[in-house]
Amino acid sequence: MTTPIPYTSITAAHWQPALGTPGEVVEGLRDIDQSIHIVLATPKGSDPHRPEFGSDLHLYIDWPLAQDWCHIRLDDTAQLLWRRELAPMGLRLFSQALAMLDAGIDCKGRPQDPDLATWEPGVSNGRLSG
């Protein structure tokens, strides 16, 4: 990310302490690089004195690009379920995600419609407390 310099060799008017290296600073382009990293790595609202500081980037990391579902039969074993449903589904979803990225399609995920949510047998379909 950045290459720190000792604080005794500061030549720029604008600088900041280097992250993770006590007694060293970054300036110039390295200062800008570290500043961008700090903004992107800080979840928005996590600094109580500056609630608008940061980004929502953490909300989109590992966001599913493509989703699907399958039926699980009572007599399914893990091996049968994997071969019949899960492995083909994984390949299909991976291909869909790659095609979306290749076509430049906006790949933001969509939250599941709560009216279409399914529940395990024996679990009430009431809303989960959060």
Image (cartoon, rainbow, N blue to C red):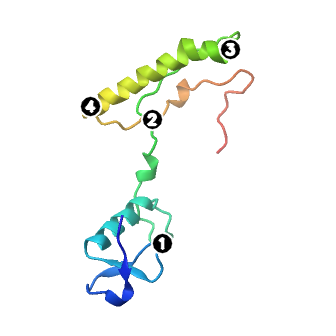
Give the residue at mark 3. 77
Element class at badge 2: loop
Give the residue at mark 2. 64
Residue 20's disc number: 1
> Does label 4 or label 1 sit earlier along the sequence?
1
Residue 72 is at least partly visible in this image = no
Residue 73 against residue 18 in the figure, above or below = above
Mark-to-mark CA distance, 3 and 2: 26 Å
Report crowding for label 1: few under 14, some 14 to 19, many 20 or more residues within 10 A (C-alpha).
few
Check disc 1 and give the amino acid type. Gly
Residue 70 locus on image (x, y percent): 55, 17
Do the numbered discs 3 and 4 sit on residues whose CB atoms are within 8 Å?
Answer: no
Report crowding for label 3: few under 14, some 14 to 19, many 20 or more residues within 10 A (C-alpha).
few
98 and 123: which is toward the camera: 98
Give the residue at mark 4. 102
> Does label 1 or label 2 sit earlier along the sequence?
1
Q: Nearer the viewer, mark 3 or mark 2?
A: 3
Who's the residue at 42% across and 29% down the image?
66
